[in-house]
Amino acid sequence: MSTPTMKLLRTAALGGVLALGLSACGETSQVPVYEDGKYSGKADTRPWESAEFKGDKAAWEAALKNRARGQNEYNRGD
Amino acid sequence: MGRMKFLCDAERCIECNGCVTACKNEHEVPWGVNRRRVVTMNDGVPGERSISVACMHCSDAPCMAVCPTNCFYKTEEGVVLHDKDQCIGCGYCFYACPFGAPQFPNGPAAFGARGKMDKCTFCAGGAEETGSQAEYDKYGSNRLAEGKLPLCAEMCSTKALLAGDANVVADIFRERVLRRGGGTEAWGWQTAYGGGGEQKREQKREREGQK
């Protein structure tokens, strides 16, 4: 009862099953490779580029240092 | 200018929550989000200690390492900030942070429903035009650009919380320790900023049966 067409179909189906079965052998590694990320967001301005300091970094640093030193109460009252 | 750092002196913190209130008010932080909070250890037991906790702006920030969208950046002054437009609210940064700093406006909801992460900015605003309404709405006020320090530290009544350039802050703390003759523990300093071999503790006791 097996006609040449049926034989061809059977061979094709067998080939398909074999290909599907072997496809698992070609599985690639799923261990992620660590990539050093780069910032992908918007650029931010620097604090001394504000309207108050107009790009004067030295003035900004001095203002902040002065403010930070003010936290030391042992320096107060002189 | 060195790096901006926080230092919490547990010997001085009186758990007044002034820092928390100052932060909330300055940045109009939404309900449920606490950029800064005060934690008390051994509450009610003699010798209890309180510490003010927020983002410590770590030298090697773990949040930056785990963010899948790379939305974190570090400014030249060492302040760790993030772009909320890039944040997907995955919560990885929250799991990575040793201080529990990242906060989510919708609380512990499912992925995608937490909202964009919010954290302490060291009062340095964010990735928007300095002093703009957009910057204020997303990140709060930008005091650093005005030459001021974070309000939590400036408002601290006992000056337990210090902020500013690492060298200045360390000098203040050193002088303090020398004058009071003890209380050298700068909580979280080692975890956030590492280094400082002199802070390492060695176990002097020998193990049983071993030399």
Image (cartoon, helix red, strand yellow):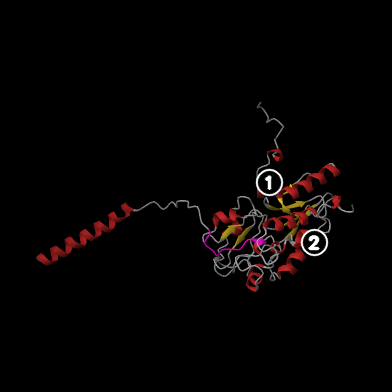
**What residue do we see at 18% from left, 62% from top?**
A12
Mark 1 Cα within 10 Å, few/some/many (few <14, many 20+)? Answer: some
In the image, is B17 to the left or to the right of B101? right
Q: Which residue is the site of mark 1? A: B190
Residue A61 position in % (x across, y down): 71, 55
Q: Residue furthest bottom?
A: B133
Q: Which mark is residue B124?
A: none
From the image, state whether disc 2 or disc 1 is nearer to you: 2
Q: Amino acid at mark 1?
A: Gln
- Tell me if B44 is positioned left or right of B63 in this view: right
Q: Amino acid at mark 2?
A: Met
- Say which residue label 2 marks: B155
Q: How many marks?
A: 2
| Disc 2 from disc 1: Cα separation | 24 Å
- Name the main secondary structure of what is drawn in magenta: loop
Does the segment drawn in magenta span residue B103?
no
Residue A43: in magenta span: yes
Q: Magenta segment, which residues?
A: A39-48
The chain containing the residue under callout 1 comes to: B
The picture places residue B85, in percent across and down from the top left corner, at: 56, 68
